[in-house]
Each structure stands twice: as structure tokens, then as C-alpha cells.
């Protein structure tokens, strides 16, 4: 009888241990399926307000330290492209960018001893009228551009067929300097003669004299 009782007790203990193990497994699986509050927060997408703030801080950082800006900008774009940027992660990015931009943590006001570097004034190129221009390269290839003004800033676009393509700030100012060095009138009239459209308004020139000049009579009387 003692042997039988011992076997029964051992069997019951084993059964209880197996049941407890199954219960612990079920609780663990339930916890994995039910995310915590922090996990739920991390799954929330980036808000528009966060995106705008990060873009603004990146622009501030660009004026302060270009090298750090390049690293931060490339990393941020890579995180977005990989789909790893969420609300919680964006908050960490904002905190790090504010520190790089010289903000102190108490209310994130800018430090009194932090001096923003004086940026080099941008040349406005006000002497170059809005319109269409062409530049001839040393090898004889002709490139076509459109110059316009948007919100007080000069905008340069490259033309291929009837499509205009944006040009970045640095390249745009280089082209404006080349137009000035070549001669604004010569560059503009070259466009009109090569394309057959008015270098001022872009309308097609049908008059023989206007095609030879590269500009229509009305625009010629208003521009130069």
C-alpha cells in the first residue's frame, strides 16, 4: 500500500506541475498577444506636427553645423524609407535635434549664451528679369532654363522639351551667374532663336523678325 500511495502522490504532483506549466504558457502567450501601453504607443504613426517640427529643426541645424545636418538628414530619411519611424521614435529625434540646435531642456527655450552664426547674405540677382534663357557650353551644347520669382526668391528650372525640372539652390545661383557673365540679353535672345518662342513670356513666335530677334515686340518694349 505504501508503494501504491507513493506512486499515486507522485503522479498527482506530476499532473499538477504539468497543469501549472500549461497555465504559465497560456499566460505568457496572452501577454504577448495583448500589447502593453508602451508597445501601443510605439505603433502609433508620426504626426504631422512632429514631421513639421523635425523639418524645421533640420533647417536650423543646417545653418549651425552642416556636417551634423548631413548625418542627421540622411539617417532620418533612411528611417522613414525603411518604415521604422513612429511617434515615439520621432519624439526622440526631436529631443536630439533640439540639443544639437542649442536648446536647453527647461521648456526647451534657446540658451542665452547660444549665438546663431551669421549667415552669408544671399544675392538676389534682381538685375536678371524673369523669363527664359539659354547657355551654350564650350562643346557647343545649348542648355535651356526658366528664371522666375517665388515668394521673393529666385527660382531656376531646367527645360527639356516642354517640361521644366527643378534645380537646387546652389546650382540655380551658378546658372544665374553664368547668365550674367554671358549677358542677359544674349542668353535670352539665344533661347528665343533656338526654341522659336519669346524669351520673355514663352509664347510661340510667328513673325519672321521676332523669330530672328528671339523676343516678341510687346515683350521687347516692356523688358529691355
Image (cartoon, grey):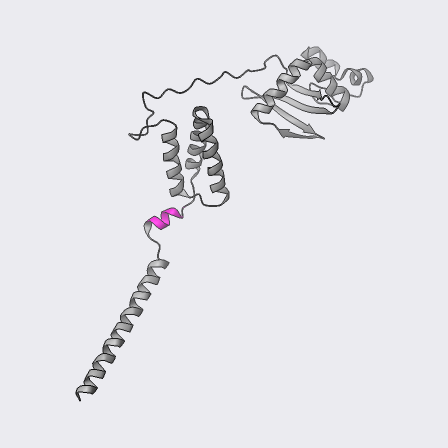
Q: Residue furthest left?
A: 2
Query: What span is colored magenta in the figure?
Result: 38-44
The one nearer the camera, 88 or 130, is: 88
Q: Position of residue 28 (x, y in %)?
A: 32, 62
Which residue is rendered at x = 81% and y = 15% of the image?
209
Position above or below: 103 against 81: above
Position above or below: 1 against 39: below
Characterize the magenta stretch by its predominant secondary structure.
Answer: helix
Q: Position of residue 93 (x, y in %)?
A: 40, 37
Quarter of the image holding residue 197?
top right
Is residue 88 shown in magenta? Answer: no
Quarter of the image holding residue 160?
top right
Q: Position of residue 168 (x, y in %)?
A: 58, 27
Q: Quadrant of the N terminus?
A: bottom left
Which residue is rendered at x = 39% and y = 42% of the image?
89
Is residue 196 something one can see in this rendering?
A: no
Q: Position of residue 73 (x, y in %)?
A: 47, 34
The one nearer the camera, 200 or 183, is: 183
Q: Quadrant of the C terminus?
A: top right
Amino acid at each position: 500500500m505504501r508503494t501504491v500511495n507513493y506512486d499515486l502522490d507522485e503522479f498527482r504532483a506530476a499532473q499538477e506541475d504539468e497543469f501549472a506549466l500549461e497555465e504559465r504558457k497560456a499566460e505568457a502567450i496572452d501577454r504577448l498577444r495583448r500589447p502593453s501601453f508602451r508597445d501601443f504607443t510605439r505603433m502609433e504613426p508620426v504626426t504631422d506636427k512632429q514631421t513639421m517640427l523635425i523639418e524645421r529643426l533640420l533647417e536650423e541645424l543646417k545653418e549651425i553645423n552642416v556636417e551634423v545636418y548631413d548625418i542627421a538628414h540622411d539617417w532620418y530619411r533612411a528611417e522613414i524609407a525603411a518604415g521604422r519611424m513612429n511617434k515615439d521614435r520621432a519624439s526622440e529625434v526631436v529631443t536630439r535635434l533640439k540639443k544639437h540646435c542649442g536648446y536647453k531642456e527647461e521648456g526647451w527655450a534657446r540658451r542665452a549664451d547660444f549665438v546663431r552664426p551669421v549667415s552669408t547674405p544671399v544675392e538676389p540677382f534682381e538685375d536678371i528679369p524673369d523669363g527664359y534663357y539659354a547657355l551654350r557650353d564650350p562643346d557647343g551644347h545649348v542648355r535651356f532654363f526658366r528664371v522666375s520669382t517665388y515668394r521673393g526668391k529666385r527660382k531656376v528650372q531646367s527645360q527639356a522639351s516642354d517640361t521644366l525640372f527643378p534645380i537646387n539652390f546652389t546650382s540655380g545661383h551658378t546658372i544665374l551667374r553664368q547668365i550674367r557673365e554671358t549677358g542677359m540679353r544674349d542668353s535670352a535672345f539665344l533661347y528665343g532663336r533656338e526654341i522659336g518662342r519669346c524669351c520673355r513670356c514663352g509664347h510661340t513666335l510667328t513673325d519672321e523678325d521676332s523669330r530672328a530677334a528671339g523676343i516678341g515686340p510687346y515683350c521687347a518694349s516692356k523688358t529691355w
